[in-house]
Image (spheres, grey):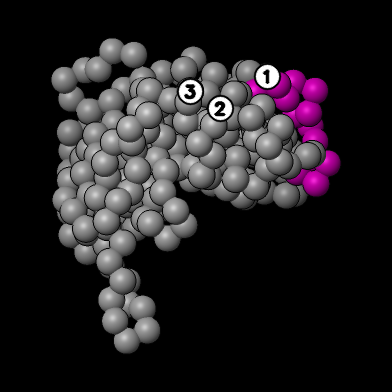
Amino acid sequence: MTKTKRPILSVRNLHRSYKSGGGVLKVLNGADIDIFPGEMVGLIGPSGSGKSTLLHAAGLLEKPNAGSVFINGKESLKLPDDERTSIRRRSIGMVYQFHHLLKEFTALDNVIIPQLIAGRPRRKAEIEATRLLTQMGLAERMTHRPSQMSGGEQQRVAIARAIANNPQILLADEPTGNLDPATSASVFQSLMNLVRQENVAALIATHNMELTRHMDRVLTVKDGLIVPLRR
C-alpha cells in the first residue's frame, strides 16, 4: 500500500457529546483521523467509546457538535443535505453489523437497486452485481432472498451492495459482529479480498482483535481521541 500525499478521508477536531440524565456525555473530544487510498484501517474500542459515532460522522450520516470531515480534500459536513447525499452515493459505502437487506428482493436485486438509484443503467447494474456477488462466493445464491440465506451469506450480500457504486471509502461498523467465529473469519476474508481488489480505503470498527492482524494500521478510541494502537 502506497500512500498518496492527500488522504481520501480526513476527520479534524471532531467533537460529539450527548445529553445523559442530568449531564453531558462526551464521546469524541477532538478526534482526528486520516485514511489514505487503498489502505485498510482497523478501529477498536469498547462499546460506547465513540467508534460508531466517528463512522457516522465520517459517512456524513450524523453532524457532530464541532469539527470537519474532508472527502477528497473537500469539507463535506457543512454542505446542504442534497450534496451530502450525493457524496455518500458516489464516494462512500457503508456496512453495518446487521445486513439490512430488502427481504422481498433477491441477493442480486439487493446489489442492483443502489446502482439504479445512483443512475446506472439496469443492464450495467446487473453485470456489476453479478461480478461482485461471484467474488463474494455467492454465484449459486444470487436468486435467493435473505430468508433463504445464512447470516454469513446475507452479510456477504451487504458487503457487495456497499461496494456496488464503486466508492472510494468503505466504512464498516462491526461487519462480522453478529456472526459465529468461523463465519466471521470467512466473511472478513471475503471483505478484505474485495477491498484489496477494488482498491477501496476502508475503516473498519471491530471488537475482534484477531481480525486486526490483517489490517495496515489499527487505531483505538481513547478519551475521545483517535490514537494508534501499539501491536
For the residue marked with disc 2, what is the amino acid? Answer: Leu
Judge whether 23 appears above or below 168 on screen: below
Number of residues whose C-alpha sits closer than 10 Å to that of mark 1, classed few (under 14), some (14–19) or many (20 or more): some
* Disc 3: which residue: 214
Magenta residues span 136-148
Which is more toward the observer, 200 or 231?
231
Across and down, in percent, residue 73 comes to: 17, 33
Cβ atoms at labels 2 and 3 below 8 Å apart: no
Among numbered discs 2 and 3, the one appearing first in the sequence:
2
For the residue marked with disc 1, what is the amino acid? Answer: Thr
The image shows a total of numbered marks equal to 3
Number of residues whose C-alpha sits closer than 10 Å to that of mark 3, classed few (under 14), some (14–19) or many (20 or more): some
Q: Identify the residue at image location x=37%, y=29%.
A: 231
Q: Main secondary structure of the magenta part?
A: loop
Judge whether 132 appears above or below 44 on screen: above
What element does badge 1 sit on? helix
Which is more toward the observer, 61 or 11?
11
For the residue marked with disc 3, what is the amino acid? Answer: His
- Which residue lies most toward the bottom here? 22
Distance in Å between CA atoms under marks 2 and 3: 11 Å
Which quadrant of the figure has residue 27? bottom left
Left or right of 146 on screen, residue 169: left
Looking at the rendered image, the disc whose residue lies closer to the viewer, 2 or 1, is: 2
Whether residue 207 is visible here, answered yes or no, is yes
* Disc 1: which residue: 134
Q: Identify the residue at image location x=36%, y=55%.
A: 50
Among numbered discs 2 and 1, the one appearing first in the sequence:
1
Distance in Å between CA atoms under marks 2 and 1: 13 Å
Looking at the rendered image, the disc whose residue lies closer to the viewer, 2 or 3, is: 3
